Amino acid sequence: MSCLLGIDLGTSSVKVVVFAVEGAIKGIGLAEYPILTPCIGYAEQDPEQWWRSTVNAVRQALAEAGHPEILGIGFSGQMHGLILLDQRKDLVRPAIIWADQRSADLLPKIEERVGLDLLGQQCGTAPTAGFLIASLYWMQKCEAELLDRVETLLLPKDFLRFKLTGELGTDETDAAGSGIFHVGRRAWADDVIERLGLPRSMFPKVHASADVVGPLTQEAATELGLPHGIPVSAGCADQPAQAVGNGLIDPPMGSVTIGTGGQVFVPLTQPLIDSALRIHTFCHAPQTKWYLLGAMLSAGMALRWLRAVLGREKVSYEELVQLASEVEPGSEGLFFLPYLVGERSPLMDPKAKAGFIGLALRHGPAHFVRALLEGVAFALRQIVDTMVGCGADLTRLVASGNGLANPIWRQIVADILNRPLCQGTGEQASERAGVGAAMIAGIGSGVFDGYQDAQKLAPIFNVVTEPNPDTVALYEPHYRSFLEIYPRMKSWRAI
């Protein structure tokens, strides 16, 4: 049996998928790691821990699959983070990841030095806390002595690729998510780099996602339990990876994802820039495609937080979400703003705060859970409405991510978006980012003849969660009320 290996480096865990070239998942491995918060607003991780977890997850997946022949290795990874290596290729500091907010106060200075018009035209996005551009600028101002030691910067999944091949570089999709990449030319935005006074030499070579960047080294092969010499592809960011895994190459079908964060993804045949820069335009894995991305920072993360606050860490997420079914839609007037670490689309406010609004003595744990699930869905609706206002077509959406695997949360999202959510059945609905990474590895290693050929293995979306018309009508005034809360609270900041 011949297979491909997809390594999906997430925020809370790394998942590894062994994917048969005929189109079935044969093995899955998973290993978790923490988010480090040395100060309020900081979010860091140890890249060496990523690697140790990847070794464990690869060995798990291979064992479950019966140690098949692996024809290629590809990657999917959490976006925007900053990894810095010195001349000896050693880590200069822990990785600053996408949830980090330390650069929030510097964003106006970036916009002033570069200009929002230039950022929009070239980079397809405003600078945002947690993006590589903002974290790098923060280092220039606050850790200049460490920045002077830097030889090369990478994005998260690129560190794993370096550990497998010894080669440094990134790919076009991850580079686009840095906020300092020319998405039209698919090259580093030299004008932006120059205006910020950053060393051009630290920006790595950029590959197409399917490019083979090297063979698996003997050292890495020994750790992973694989033969050396397997071709390793550049890989891509997690959102285009799940899109490839779901066959979302061309419009109009897009996706909505609930993982640690939440995302709405719409493929494009040409770049489409939001004039207000409330959403992002990035490069898709195929070199002739782009996509619109609206991202909220705290979706599944919020549910994980609530589980801890309620003291129910030993309760499964399925059991926790089940509590929501005890409460009528609308949570009896309780609202949740899901801005635990600020917010991106469409607010673009790193200082936005979360909160439960409308508390009454009657409200209990079930109300909190339902209000949280609805609050995340309302925030996703804001993103969808913003995209539609920019001219995007979102009539059909694929439900992706662990959050939407739950039928209760999926129905809430379908009702609030007032759109059907499509899924495959069984394993067809699972691990699509890892499957997409494996498919891209198959293109690079010659197993598939391009993205259209790999697309034949995409799921058949034969499960559709239709919005309930009665609940849709009930949610509409609640959504309008939700929209009013943030503007009223924005002028008030907790000390």
Image: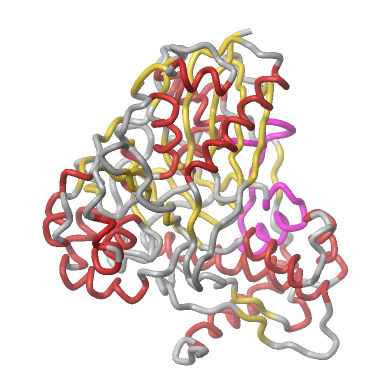
x then y, percent, for residue 124 = 28, 55
Q: Say if 274 sits above or below 441 in the image.
A: below
> How would you classify the magenta stretch by its main secondary structure?
helix
Asked where in the image residue 313 lies, by quadrant, the reply is bottom right
Q: How many marks?
A: 0
Pick whichever, 100 or 19, lies toward us. 100
Q: Which region of the structure is painted magenta?
A: 403-432
Q: Residue 405 colored magenta?
A: yes
- Would you say 423 lies left or right of 136 here? right
Q: Residue at x 57, y 34 (%)?
A: 54
Q: Residue at x 24, y 35 (%)?
A: 205
Q: Say if 82 sits above or below 303 in the image.
A: above
x then y, percent, for residue 394 = 49, 52
Q: Say if 358 sits above or below 18 in the image.
A: below
Of the 4 image quadrants, the one containing the N terminus is top right
x then y, percent, for residue 347 = 43, 72
Pick whichever, 437 or 56, lies toward us. 56
Residue 180 seen anywhere in this rendered image of the structure: yes
Q: Residue 400 colored magenta?
A: no
- Would you say 226 lies left or right of 356 here? left
